[in-house]
Amino acid sequence: MNLSSALAVDSQESRGPLHEDEGVAECPLCKYQDESIIAKLNDMHRRLVDRISEAELYAIIVSTYEKEIEPLRRQGRCLLELTVEQCRLHFDKHVINPSKSIIDDINFCERIQRHIRDNVALHNKRTGHTNINKAYTKEWVTISKHKLDLIRYYSLHRRRQQESKSSGNQVASSDVYNFT
């Protein structure tokens, strides 16, 4: 038995499509991404994404946005209401950040490894013997190697970011990609 058959869906479950087009029609952060306030929020996200939790990050972004637009509101301007959910949707679906992608992949590998670890032993209730599922062990080793490669790559990526900061250069704009 390999990992793909172990993760197969039984008759009680069903698979569904990934709803990748979620929010594309009218994402305000994409629509107004050339505005200086939105550019500032994008930069804040890029700098903090792998340092604090997503919930905190999106709350800080919304709070910063509210502080930035307060003078404009006092002038009576009608401005976009930005929510934490809009931030989550925009930064999860419309912006690719290499650091976040690598971290997400590392976490996914860890979840798969936990699943394998929890199911690697085959207990024979009749005889009382325990056997190790060799296919699971092989899958675990493969995923472990991949995860370690991702960790090495992430460390190299972070080191390059730190070197770039210390030399006075900002992270290249090509490090964050917007797809609208």
Image: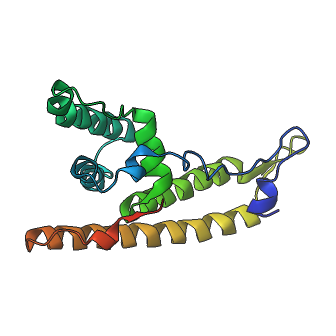
Picture residue at 71% right of the left edge, 61% below the top: 136
In the image, 120 versus 175, the foreground residue is 175
Q: What percent of the width, then of the height, locates residue 106?
A: 48, 59
* Quarter residue 74 falls in: top left
Picture residue at 21% right of the left edge, 28% below the top: 73
* Quarter residue 113 falls in: bottom right
Left-right relation of 24 to 132: left
In the image, 144 versus 121, the foreground residue is 144
* Quarter residue 65 falls in: top left
Q: What percent of the width, then of the height, locates residue 175?
A: 33, 69
Left-right relation of 167 to 128: left
Left-right relation of 125 to 32: right
Colour scheme of the picture: rainbow
Q: What percent of the width, then of the height, locates residue 24?
A: 54, 50
Picture residue at 16% right of the left edge, 73% below the top: 163
Picture residue at 38% right of the left edge, 73% below the top: 153
